Amino acid sequence: MAYSLRVRCSDCESEWYVDPQDITLHLWRPSDAGRPWYTFVCAGCEQEQVKKVNNPRVYEMLTEAQCPIEYHAVSPDLLEEHKGDEISYDDLIDLHFALRDDTRDWTKELNLDD
């Protein structure tokens, strides 16, 4: 079955029917790392467009039309659960000055002697 997909450009606000091979679906690995998105180049203004896949039907249409797929790996540390307070600007400033202090023994302060 031949497909032609309608897309809308956010820059020039024109609508075009494009071949599925001109749209790239982007997926995260692992898949639960984030929402998929798709990209295409507008035929009118030639700007690359990046669109979120906001509902399952759009995803189904892109996969049924066999659009090219690019996979993007997520660093495992981004998926880890982080505990504690967020780092503030004051924390970063304190760290900056602490790192410049040559008189501090970091192995003792970070318990690296054990």
Image (cartoon, grey):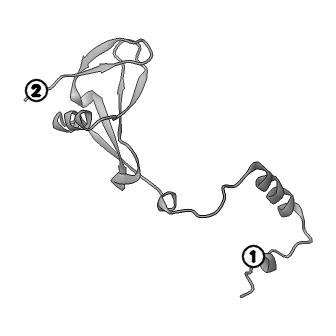
Gap between marks 1 and 2 measured at Cα: 63 Å
Q: Which residue is mark 2?
A: 2
**95 relative to 55, above or below:** below
Secondary structure beneath disc 1?
Answer: loop
Q: Position of residue 72 (x, y in %)?
A: 39, 48
Report the side of 86 relative to 26 (left or right).
right
Specify the farthest residue to the right: 103
* Residue in view at x 92 percent, y 71 percent: 103
* Residue in view at x 48 percent, y 57 percent: 75
**Residue 38 image-quadrant placement:** top left
Report the side of 42 relative to 112 (left or right).
left
**Residue 69 image-quadrant placement:** top left
Q: Which residue is mark 1?
A: 110
Q: Position of residue 51 (x, y in %)?
A: 38, 30
Specify the farthest residue to the left: 1
**Residue situated in front as seen by the camera: 79 or 63:** 79
Secondary structure beneath disc 2?
Answer: loop
**Residue situated in front as seen by the camera: 85 or 45:** 85
Q: Earlier in the sequence, mark 1 or mark 2?
A: 2
Q: Mark 2 and mark 1 in contact (Cβ < 8 Å)?
A: no
* Residue type, label 2: Ala
* Residue type, label 1: Leu
* Residue in view at x 75 percent, y 76 percent: 110
Q: Position of residue 99 (x, y in %)?
A: 83, 62
